[in-house]
Image: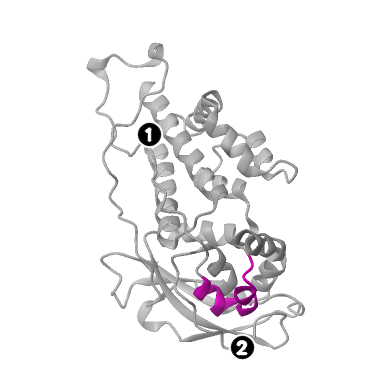
Amino acid sequence: MFQVAAHPQTFPHHHLRHDAPPQHRRPASSAPAPIQLPRTLARPAFADIARDALAGAAPDLAAAGVPDEFIRHGLRAKGPAMLAGISALAPSHIPQSLPRSRLPPVLSVPLRAAAHGVALPTHALAVSPAGKVKDDADAPTTLYPVHAVVLAAHCTALPRMPRPAGPAGPASAAHAALPVLPLALPSPPAFAIIHAWLYAARLDAVLSSLLPAALPSPFLARLADPAAPALRTLEAALAARPTLHALATHVCAAAAGNLGALMGHAGHVKELWQDVVALGICDAGLWAAIDVAWEVVLGAMNLAAAQ
């Protein structure tokens, strides 16, 4: 199996920090028992692009010794063409779910009529749960068309991917032949967020997926503004406690103070964090988005518990 190590799914136990103003807290005698969550989500050690993995996906880039950031910058510029290549595949021929035992070695997908001139994906990832069921032949998998060079450039924990069945690049045939690679991750559903981010690099979309309909529109609009780097906006938010408090207040109100709903948000953030760690993604922007989401969810839960 094409697999990366799963980050431990058990959180270390720390008390949830109380940031609510004292006048809004309940008396200690009537306060519920504190919810056990980690104060921060640990980041893995930074890692450069694995040159062996890059050589398998883009030999020219590996041979030329192009710096990591230039590779990622160039891929962001090619993101629309790659997304068009994924969209060129006939979706009805990509199974929504298959058991591991029924995965084909190669997925042959017909192309739509408008597929000419786009960058087709090179592989299909069959994502399934890691952990106790990693050897379960009936474990469900979700298939994602991907470009090997995108994974090699961002996911430093992945080994070298096998060569595609045919040359990558503009579509010219009636079908795309995608080698199928089983990939076990701590949270298969969270990979959908990563897959979208790998191609669009939209941090506002990451936060909207983690906290659906919960963050204020002006904040998300600033993240989507190409004139203001999203990383700078996120770093400024992390450095400004009033901003984090305002965002937490908005999220708490959107959940109507329901701790169960807020715990659901926390679970989404935790699951994305686990997958990002397992894949070895070291992007500063994505990590800043995860940090903001976690800070805001903790703050919202504190506010809800104090009501």
At 30% from the left and 70% from the top, the residue drawn is: 134
Query: Disc 2 marks which residue?
Result: 166
- Seen in the picture, residue 48 relative to 263 is either above or below; the reply is below
Count residues near mark 1 (Cα–Cα under 10 Å), then give few for <14, some for 14-19, many for 20+: some
In the rendering, which numbered label is found on residue 163?
none
Main structural element of the magenta stretch: helix, strand or loop? helix
At 28% from the left and 74% from the top, the residue drawn is: 136
- Seen in the picture, residue 105 relative to 295 is either above or below; the reply is below
Residue 94 in sight from this viewpoint: no
* Residue 94 position by quadrant: bottom right
Q: Nearer the viewer, residue 11 or 54?
A: 54
Residue 90 in sight from this viewpoint: yes
Q: CA distance from mark 2 to mark 1?
A: 51 Å
At 53% from the left and 44% from the top, the residue drawn is: 289
* Residue 61 drawn in magenta: yes
What color scheme is it? one colour
At 41% from the left and 39% from the top, the residue drawn is: 261
Q: Nearer the viewer, residue 105 or 31?
A: 105
What's the amino acid at mark 1? Leu
Quarter of the picture containing the C terminus is top left
Q: Position of residue 300 (x, y in %)?
A: 44, 30
* Residue 259 drawn in magenta: no
What's the amino acid at mark 2? Gly
Count residues near mark 2 (Cα–Cα under 10 Å), then give few for <14, some for 14-19, many for 20+: few
Counting residues from the start of the chain, the first of labels 2 and 1 encountered is 2
Query: Disc 1 marks which residue?
Result: 259
Q: Which range is magenta?
A: 51-66
* Residue 146 position by quadrant: bottom right
Quarter of the picture containing the N terminus is bottom left
Q: Position of residue 71 (x, y in %)?
A: 64, 64
